[in-house]
Image (spheres, rainbow, N blue to C red):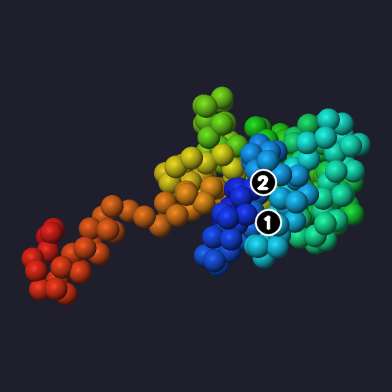
Amino acid sequence: MALFLDSASADDARKAATLGFVAGITTNPTLVAATGRAPGDVIAELCDVHPGLVFYQPVAPTVAEAEAEVRRISGLRPGRVGIKLPSTPAHFVLGHRLAQEGFIVGMTAIFSPAQAYLAYQVGARYVLPYVNRSTRLLGDGPGLVRAMRAVLEACGGGVEILAASIKTRDEAVETLLAGAHSLTIPLALIEALGRHEHSDGAIADFAASVRGTPAATP
């Protein structure tokens, strides 16, 4: 299982790089637009400050233009950029063509096991379901992940579920237990995974015992 940073912020990427265990970065058009910078500049800097794979999702209105866009962006840092494509019939065709050429392709905005099956057929390396959004729209985001995992295992494996749209620690754990291979989450949630109020209490008790004062809890 791998952990990815979901951000287009270079500062977040630098912090994630210092952690040492964050495998890569996923971006999306909204995150990139929020930087106020050109997409190529954003992706190039993310590649420069973090050693892992950096995913880019095109925003061009046509598939032909999207193909030209991803080829241009990936060429800025060859071998470092993964391609996220929205799960539409035309983009599945583009994903197949790019995968055959050796691009690392992730099909994103997946909301059904059928789409995961098609991603397997086209040669995608990753499928990215939106867990929290699926719960809000369909009722059970982790259930979608569970069904996707069953379909992909029936196909023989080889495609990883990189789950996105995860808002809480509990949702992250539930998604992993449902069968996600990896998660992509914001930096704040990565940091939150390592925290627990009872851990803080136990540490305070240890410190109190070292100082020779009564512990706060039994």
111 left or right, relative to 68: left
The residue lying at 56 percent from left, 25 percent from top is 138
Regarding residue 60, the answer to whether it shows in the image is yes
The residue lying at 54 percent from left, 66 percent from top is 18
Q: Which residue is mark 1?
A: 46
The residue lying at 75 percent from left, 51 percent from top is 41
Discs 1, 2 touching: Cβ within 8 Å: yes
Q: Position of residue 17 (x, y in %)?
A: 58, 64
Q: Residue furthest front?
A: 36
Q: Position of residue 19 (x, y in %)?
A: 52, 65
Q: Which mark is residue 218?
A: none
Above-or-below relation of 20 to 74:
below
Above-or-below relation of 92 to 138:
below
> In whole angstroms, how far apart are the C-alphas of marks 1 and 2?
10 Å
> Which quadrant of the structure image shows residue 76?
bottom right
Badge 2 marks a residue whose secondary structure is: loop
- For the residue pair 128 and 145, the one nearer the viewer reads as 128
Q: Which mark is residue 27?
A: 2
Q: Quadrant of the N terminus?
A: bottom right
